[in-house]
Image: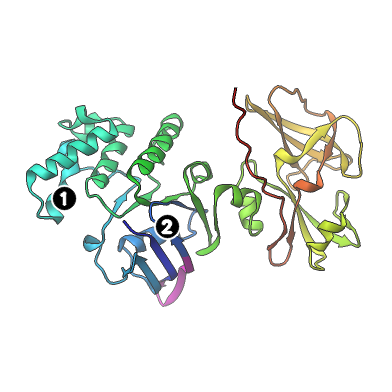
Amino acid sequence: MAGLTLDNVTKIFDDDGEEIVAVDDVSIDIDDGEFLVLVGPSGCGKSTTLRMIAGLEEISEGEIRLGETVMNDIPPTKRNVAMVFQSYALYPHMTVRENMAFGLEESTDMPDDEIDMRVEEAAELLGIPELLERPPSDLSGGQQQRVALGRAIVRDPEVFLMDEPLANLDAKLRAEMRTELQQLQEDLGVTTVYVTHNQVEAMTMSDRVAILNDGILQQCATPLECYHQPNNLFVAGFIGEPSMNFFDAERQGSTLVTDDFEYELSEETISSLGGETDLVFGIRPEDVTLKSAVESNHDYRTVVDVVEPMGDENVVHLVFEGNEVSEDDLFTAVLDGMKSVDAKQNLVAEFPEEAIHLFDRKSGEALRNRELEAAESPPVR
């Protein structure tokens, strides 16, 4: 086994003489056995990055290394990586056993009995030994996904590459397969690069998340670091559902002035801003406290516009008192699902200073994030 390194990797496509930079100078060190998720909006370069690792796209600049071996000029069939696609790509005229064995039969000189042993071991690991003699047409979507995983496992690769492998499954099965994939990757200990646009998958499955936008790496960190300590406005807005609330603000001395409210800053917060005055104020919906009365200078009168009951929580859309209801003026709070809130209700929203984020409005760079506290262990009874 070995770690995987992307060193200043760039991919430029030629579109009728016009250069299109799909991946721009991306550098990531992926540890041996790590589960890294590449996430970002459509067209951000995540699948192109995966295809360069697989050798399906040539690298324009930079290096990809597996351990100490530079992979740039190694053909796909000679790279010890296995790819799992969104489409599963199973051969309909073959049985499950034949599908899982096909890659080894075509690319190695391995004896048939050893190939068969690997197939049966992988099928046992995936819980599908009873499906080995069936054609893909007899299988459910989840079973087909397991077969596609099995085809990758039998190759015993140094790296798994997964391109939106759960996208075609329904929500319930997708949640089950997320857990199964995590357990499988931990059991096998294989370095895994997983591409998705689904931030729930990114947050729940990964050891680290690499967030791309317009081909540029925005942040590579643990899920909690990306959520609570985003590098910039893009990461702060992309990670989290509902997304972070943002308000353009100008610092006048110790006061932030927005179109809707004024916010007094402590000396400690001011010192983190480095003299910047053109800012964006951010706060996550779950950090907004809703109550009945004004109690501090960080409390603001609001009116409830819409309540979205989710069962375990209520997503509350609000507007500052005196404002017209419009998409630009609404902000969001998240409440416990057992607390009753009604449309048109008057409430006070508190923005606790320990929970706020501040960004440079011009560069988008984070100037002040909330502290990421160490997680507490559950009480032992």
Asked which quadrant contains residue 317, the reply is: top right
- SS for callout 1: helix
Q: Is residue 26 above or below residue 283?
A: below
Q: Residue 294's mark?
A: none
Which region shows up in magenta?
Answer: 12-27
Q: Which residue is mark 1?
A: 104
Which residue appears farthest toward the bottom when viewing the image?
A: 17
N-terminal label among 1 and 2: 2
Of the 4 image quadrants, the one containing the N terminus is: bottom left
Q: CA distance from mark 1 to mark 2?
A: 26 Å
Of the 4 image quadrants, the one containing the C terminus is: top right
Q: Amino acid at mark 2?
A: Asp
Observer-nearest of 288 and 207: 207
Question: In the drawing, does residue 148 fall left or right of residue 334?
Answer: left
Q: Residues within 10 Å of mark 1 (few under 14, many from 20)?
A: many
Q: Is residue 174 above or below residue 153?
A: above
Q: Amino acid at mark 1?
A: Leu
Q: Is residue 168 visible?
A: no
Q: Is residue 300 covered in magenta? A: no
Image depth: mark 1 or mark 2 in front: 2
Give the residue drawn at x 22%, y 45%. Answer: 154
Q: Is residue 171 above or below residue 115?
A: above
Q: Which residue is mark 2?
A: 31
Q: Is residue 311 above or below residue 199?
A: above
